[in-house]
Amino acid sequence: MKKLMTIAEVAKELDIPESTARYYRDSFIDYIPSVGEGRKKRYRSETVEVLRFIAEGFKRKLTATEIENGLSQMFPRNFDIEQPTAVTTAAAQQQAENDVKQYALQLQIAFEQMGKTMQVIADQKEEIAELRKHVADVEKKQQHQEDYINNKLEERDQKLIQSLRDSQETKKLLLEVQEQIATSLEEKKSWWQKLWKR
């Protein structure tokens, strides 16, 4: 049978800090195959694959719930085994080896499914991110259009006000000119009248 490992050895196998391996183990303890208790607790080689799955999930920015859902589909819960007794029959040993081989085959199939599942989740997250970006772009363009329309309306209002002011100024000038012409005509008329009276 394959040798049992300490958590430090598991961390080294995965090339991650021991503290990280302990965090993964404690967060998903129901899926960690172990033997013994306390300081004597050791981990089966399958623990490496379970923690690798967890690490990959966090790397892909999955939530703890999403990772646990994946674990529940790929690995059995609570499969601690008892410390082996001193007396072990050849039949029991053979059965254990067969169980390991069968488990390894199931694990291989599970990892293939896990890869596909994680890819689907990653693709969905990417699509959601793209949709959010698209919505943000549309909202930004809409805001630009609203600002453009408001600016144009403000410019139009200012031009209209200026045009009305210019019109009033022109009307005022015309009235002044008319008054000046009328005054000038009166003065000329008065001069001619004075001239003819002589």
Image: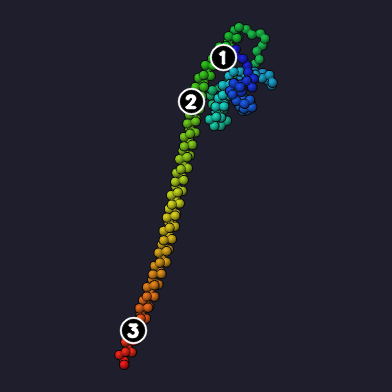
**Numbered mark located on residue 100 in the image:** 1
* View extreme (top): residue: 90
Task: Give amino acid for label 3.
Answer: Lys
Q: Residue at x 66, y 11 (%)?
A: 85
Circle 2 residue:
116
Out of 122 and 184, give the one closest to the viewer.
184
Q: Residue at x 65, y 16 (%)?
A: 82
80 on left or right of 185: right
Where residue 196 appears, as percent x and y from the top left, is 30, 90
In this picture, is 22 found above or below 142? above
129 on left or right of 21: left
* SS label for mark 2: helix
Q: Earlier in the sequence, mark 3 or mark 2?
A: 2
Circle 3 residue:
188
In this picture, is 141 found above or below 160? above
Corner quadrant of residue 180: bottom left
Sort mark 3 into few (<14), some (14-19) or many (20+) by Cα contacts within 10 Å: few
Distance from the alpha carbon under mark 3 to that under mark 2: 106 Å
3 and 1 marks in contact (CB < 8 Å):
no
Task: Give amino acid for label 2.
Answer: Lys
117 on left or right of 38: left
Task: Give amino acid for label 1.
Answer: Val
User: The C terminus is located in which quarter?
Assistant: bottom left
Where residue 131 appears, as percent x and y from the top left, is 46, 38
User: The N terminus is located in which quarter?
Assistant: top right
Q: Earlier in the sequence, mark 2 or mark 1?
A: 1
Where residue 178 appears, as percent x and y from the top left, is 36, 76
Sort mark 2 into few (<14), some (14-19) or many (20+) by Cα contacts within 10 Å: few
* View extreme (left): residue: 196
45 on left or right of 167: right
Out of 111 and 76, give the one closest to the viewer.
111
